[in-house]
Amino acid sequence: MTRSFRRVVTGHDDMGVAIVESDEIATQVLQRPNRPGVTLTNFWLSDGTPAEYDGPTETCTGPFILHPPENGSVFRCVEFLPEDPEVLAKLDGKSAFAEMGAAANIVENARHPFMHRTNSVDYGIVLSGEIYMMMDEDEILLKAGDMVVQRGTNHAWSNRGTEPCSIVFVLVDGVTMRDAPDDDKTGIPKR
Protein backbone atom coordinates (compact mmCIF):
# COMPACT_ATOMS: atom_id res chain seq x y z
CA MET A 1 0.00 0.00 0.00
CA THR A 2 1.38 3.34 -1.04
CA ARG A 3 1.57 6.10 1.51
CA SER A 4 -0.20 9.43 0.98
CA PHE A 5 1.43 12.61 2.24
CA ARG A 6 -0.24 15.68 3.70
CA ARG A 7 1.32 18.81 2.21
CA VAL A 8 0.96 22.16 3.98
CA VAL A 9 1.95 25.32 2.08
CA THR A 10 2.23 28.67 3.83
CA GLY A 11 2.01 32.18 2.47
CA HIS A 12 0.72 35.67 3.32
CA ASP A 13 -2.70 37.27 3.10
CA ASP A 14 -3.33 40.73 1.60
CA MET A 15 -2.26 42.33 4.90
CA GLY A 16 1.07 40.44 5.04
CA VAL A 17 -0.09 38.09 7.80
CA ALA A 18 1.39 34.57 7.66
CA ILE A 19 -1.29 32.02 6.75
CA VAL A 20 -1.72 28.44 5.56
CA GLU A 21 -2.62 28.70 1.87
CA SER A 22 -3.01 24.97 1.21
CA ASP A 23 -3.44 21.92 3.45
CA GLU A 24 -4.21 18.78 1.48
CA ILE A 25 -2.84 15.48 0.28
CA ALA A 26 -0.02 15.84 -2.27
CA THR A 27 -1.44 14.92 -5.67
CA GLN A 28 1.52 14.75 -8.08
CA VAL A 29 2.23 11.03 -7.72
CA LEU A 30 3.98 8.73 -10.19
CA GLN A 31 3.64 4.95 -10.28
CA ARG A 32 4.35 2.94 -13.38
CA PRO A 33 4.52 -0.69 -14.51
CA ASN A 34 8.04 -0.19 -15.94
CA ARG A 35 9.27 0.41 -12.36
CA PRO A 36 6.97 -1.67 -10.16
CA GLY A 37 7.10 -1.10 -6.41
CA VAL A 38 8.34 2.49 -6.62
CA THR A 39 6.13 5.52 -5.96
CA LEU A 40 7.32 9.11 -6.33
CA THR A 41 5.39 11.99 -4.76
CA ASN A 42 6.32 15.59 -5.54
CA PHE A 43 5.64 18.26 -2.91
CA TRP A 44 7.20 21.38 -4.45
CA LEU A 45 9.09 22.54 -7.53
CA SER A 46 11.13 25.71 -7.80
CA ASP A 47 12.05 26.79 -11.31
CA GLY A 48 14.83 29.20 -10.38
CA THR A 49 17.12 30.53 -7.73
CA PRO A 50 16.64 32.36 -5.55
CA ALA A 51 13.40 30.47 -5.02
CA GLU A 52 10.23 32.57 -5.00
CA TYR A 53 8.12 32.43 -1.86
CA ASP A 54 5.36 34.76 -3.07
CA GLY A 55 4.43 32.91 -6.25
CA PRO A 56 1.80 30.28 -6.97
CA THR A 57 0.57 27.99 -4.20
CA GLU A 58 0.71 24.98 -6.53
CA THR A 59 3.97 24.35 -8.38
CA CYS A 60 3.61 20.59 -9.02
CA THR A 61 1.82 20.80 -12.34
CA GLY A 62 2.63 19.40 -15.75
CA PRO A 63 4.53 16.20 -16.50
CA PHE A 64 6.38 14.35 -13.74
CA ILE A 65 10.10 14.81 -14.51
CA LEU A 66 12.97 13.09 -12.67
CA HIS A 67 15.44 15.96 -12.56
CA PRO A 68 14.93 19.42 -11.07
CA PRO A 69 14.17 22.37 -13.36
CA GLU A 70 17.15 24.33 -14.68
CA ASN A 71 18.48 26.49 -11.80
CA GLY A 72 15.69 25.06 -9.63
CA SER A 73 14.88 22.30 -7.20
CA VAL A 74 12.33 19.60 -6.49
CA PHE A 75 11.13 18.32 -3.10
CA ARG A 76 9.77 14.75 -3.19
CA CYS A 77 9.43 11.45 -1.41
CA VAL A 78 10.15 8.09 -3.01
CA GLU A 79 8.80 4.84 -1.61
CA PHE A 80 10.64 1.65 -2.58
CA LEU A 81 8.91 -1.67 -1.94
CA PRO A 82 11.12 -4.74 -1.56
CA GLU A 83 12.57 -5.82 -4.92
CA ASP A 84 11.85 -9.15 -6.55
CA PRO A 85 15.11 -10.14 -8.31
CA GLU A 86 13.25 -12.20 -10.94
CA VAL A 87 11.00 -9.27 -11.89
CA LEU A 88 13.91 -6.83 -11.75
CA ALA A 89 15.91 -8.93 -14.24
CA LYS A 90 13.15 -8.46 -16.86
CA LEU A 91 12.77 -4.67 -16.54
CA ASP A 92 14.09 -2.02 -18.92
CA GLY A 93 15.50 0.91 -16.97
CA LYS A 94 15.72 3.16 -20.01
CA SER A 95 11.96 2.79 -20.70
CA ALA A 96 11.10 3.43 -17.06
CA PHE A 97 13.21 6.58 -16.93
CA ALA A 98 11.86 7.76 -20.30
CA GLU A 99 8.47 8.03 -18.58
CA MET A 100 10.04 10.74 -16.41
CA GLY A 101 11.82 12.54 -19.25
CA ALA A 102 15.10 10.97 -18.22
CA ALA A 103 15.97 8.10 -20.59
CA ALA A 104 19.39 9.71 -21.12
CA ASN A 105 20.05 9.56 -17.36
CA ILE A 106 20.21 5.76 -17.25
CA VAL A 107 23.67 4.16 -17.07
CA GLU A 108 23.88 1.54 -19.82
CA ASN A 109 25.07 -2.00 -18.94
CA ALA A 110 25.21 -1.20 -15.21
CA ARG A 111 24.89 -3.80 -12.47
CA HIS A 112 21.34 -2.61 -11.65
CA PRO A 113 18.74 -1.82 -14.35
CA PHE A 114 17.91 1.53 -12.72
CA MET A 115 21.46 2.83 -12.25
CA HIS A 116 21.30 6.51 -13.22
CA ARG A 117 22.73 9.95 -12.60
CA THR A 118 21.45 13.50 -12.75
CA ASN A 119 23.25 16.82 -12.94
CA SER A 120 22.13 17.72 -9.46
CA VAL A 121 23.03 17.70 -5.79
CA ASP A 122 20.43 15.57 -4.00
CA TYR A 123 19.83 15.69 -0.27
CA GLY A 124 18.18 12.50 1.02
CA ILE A 125 16.75 11.51 4.38
CA VAL A 126 15.69 7.90 4.95
CA LEU A 127 12.34 8.15 6.75
CA SER A 128 11.62 4.46 7.21
CA GLY A 129 12.97 1.07 6.27
CA GLU A 130 16.37 0.42 4.80
CA ILE A 131 17.87 0.42 1.31
CA TYR A 132 21.15 -0.18 -0.46
CA MET A 133 22.60 2.79 -2.32
CA MET A 134 24.55 1.19 -5.15
CA MET A 135 27.37 3.12 -6.81
CA ASP A 136 29.56 2.07 -9.76
CA GLU A 137 31.48 -0.37 -7.55
CA ASP A 138 30.53 0.33 -3.93
CA GLU A 139 27.26 -0.04 -2.09
CA ILE A 140 26.16 1.03 1.35
CA LEU A 141 23.17 0.09 3.47
CA LEU A 142 21.17 3.13 4.60
CA LYS A 143 18.65 2.90 7.44
CA ALA A 144 15.91 5.11 8.87
CA GLY A 145 17.43 8.38 10.07
CA ASP A 146 20.45 8.21 7.75
CA MET A 147 21.24 11.17 5.48
CA VAL A 148 22.86 11.10 2.07
CA VAL A 149 24.24 13.82 -0.19
CA GLN A 150 24.26 12.51 -3.77
CA ARG A 151 26.58 14.69 -5.89
CA GLY A 152 25.91 13.90 -9.54
CA THR A 153 27.14 10.31 -9.21
CA ASN A 154 25.93 7.09 -10.83
CA HIS A 155 23.65 5.33 -8.38
CA ALA A 156 20.72 2.96 -7.96
CA TRP A 157 18.44 2.16 -5.03
CA SER A 158 17.92 -1.49 -4.07
CA ASN A 159 15.47 -2.54 -1.36
CA ARG A 160 16.55 -6.09 -0.53
CA GLY A 161 14.64 -6.16 2.75
CA THR A 162 11.08 -7.13 3.64
CA GLU A 163 9.64 -3.69 4.49
CA PRO A 164 9.00 -0.59 2.35
CA CYS A 165 11.63 2.14 2.43
CA SER A 166 10.68 5.82 2.16
CA ILE A 167 13.25 8.49 1.37
CA VAL A 168 12.65 12.24 1.20
CA PHE A 169 14.77 14.01 -1.43
CA VAL A 170 15.50 17.60 -2.33
CA LEU A 171 17.15 17.71 -5.77
CA VAL A 172 18.96 20.93 -6.63
CA ASP A 173 20.03 21.62 -10.21
CA GLY A 174 23.81 21.46 -10.31
CA VAL A 175 27.02 21.68 -12.28
CA THR A 176 30.40 20.00 -11.82
CA MET A 177 31.91 23.35 -10.84
CA ARG A 178 30.52 26.84 -11.48
CA ASP A 179 33.79 28.02 -13.05
CA ALA A 180 34.28 24.93 -15.28
CA PRO A 181 34.39 25.47 -19.06
CA ASP A 182 30.91 25.15 -20.59
CA ASP A 183 31.66 21.71 -22.07
CA ASP A 184 32.68 20.41 -18.62
CA LYS A 185 29.90 21.94 -16.48
CA THR A 186 27.72 18.80 -16.57
CA GLY A 187 28.36 15.08 -16.67
CA ILE A 188 30.96 13.14 -14.77
CA PRO A 189 33.76 15.49 -13.64
CA LYS A 190 37.04 15.22 -15.52
CA ARG A 191 39.98 14.77 -13.19
Image: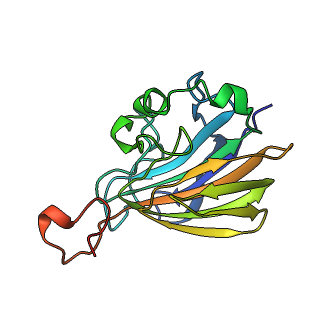
Of the pair 35 and 111, the residue shown nearer to us = 111
Q: Quick check: 43 left or right of 108?
A: right
Locate the C terminus by quadrant.
bottom left
Locate the N terminus by quadrant.
top right
- Where 50 sits versus 107, above or below? below
What kind of colouring is applied to the model shown? rainbow
- Where 87 sits versus 172, above or below? above
> Toward which corner of the image does residue 137 lie, by quadrant?
bottom right
- Where 134 sits versus 184, above or below? above
Residue 36 visible (yes or no): yes
Residue 63 visible (yes or no): no
Q: Quick check: 48 left or right of 20?
A: left
Q: Quick check: 185 left or right of 72?
A: left
Q: Position of residue 34 (x, y in %)?
A: 55, 24
Q: Position of residue 124 (x, y in %)?
A: 60, 62
Q: Position of residue 84 (x, y in %)?
A: 74, 32
Q: Quick check: 28 left or right of 191?
A: right
How many marks overall?
0
Q: Residue at x 75, y 58 (%)?
A: 127
Q: Position of residue 58 (x, y in %)?
A: 47, 43
Q: Residue at x 60, y 21 (%)?
A: 33
Of the pair 156 and 143, the residue shown nearer to us = 156
Q: Residue at x 71, y 60 (%)?
A: 126
> Toward which corner of the image does residue 149 lie, by quadrant?
bottom right
